[in-house]
Every structure is written in structure tokens, then in C-alpha cells.
Amino acid sequence: MAMSPNRAVPRRYLPTSPFGRPDPEPPAERYSVDDMVSHDTYGLGTVTGVEEGVALIIDFGTHVRRITTPSAKLIKL
């Protein structure tokens, strides 16, 4: 008796299975000019410029920083 070839069929996931599908990632935050943000290192700041999908320019009061997005240390308020 020979083994049957693998089927290229996706497996069916049961809702009660501990090995179910992972939760989808939340959508990336969208920033615009004048948004208030908090950074773990630099503190509170205001977005002064947006480079879509690349970076944000943020004024932290005493200095201005360019921070690439997405950043785990940056929270939109």
C-alpha cells in the first residue's frame, strides 16, 4: 500500500482550538500635523510634519526630532 500524496487544501480551524488563527494586527496609526503624541524617551510633543509611511517630525518643546514610523515608543494622544 502506497502513501497518498499531500492535499493542497487549507486546514479547517475550529473556534475552540487552542491553535486557532492569530488575531489580526491592528491597523497602523495615522498621524497628522498638530497631533499630540507621547514618546517614552522625549516626553510630550506635537507633530509638525508627516512623511507618509516613513517618519514624523515632532516638536518636543526644547528640541525637534524625526522619528521613523511605526515606533513602539510613540503613542498618539
Image (cartoon, rainbow, N blue to C red):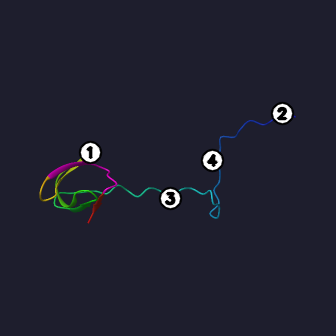
- The kind of residue on which mark 3 rests is Asp
Q: Position of residue 61 (x, y in %)?
A: 12, 59
Q: Is residue 72 magenta?
A: yes
Q: Quadrant of the N terminus?
A: top right
Mark positioned earlier in the residue sequence (1 or 3): 3
The image position of residue 59, as x and y in percent, is 15, 56
**Measured Cα–Cα span from mark 2 to mark 3:** 39 Å
Nearest to viewer (mark 2 / mark 3): 3
Sequence-wise first label, 4 or 3: 4
Q: SS for tag 4?
A: loop
**Which mark is on residue 10?**
4
| Boundaries of the magenta span | 64-73
Q: CA distance from mark 4 to mark 1?
A: 35 Å
| Contact flag, marks 1 and 3 (Cβ < 8 Å) | no
Which residue carries the number 2 mark?
2
Amino acid found under the numbered disc labelled 4: Pro
Disc 4 crowd rating (10 Å Cα; few below 14, some 14-19, many 20+) is few
Instruction: Report helix, strand or loop for mark 2.
Output: loop
Front: mark 4 or 1: 1
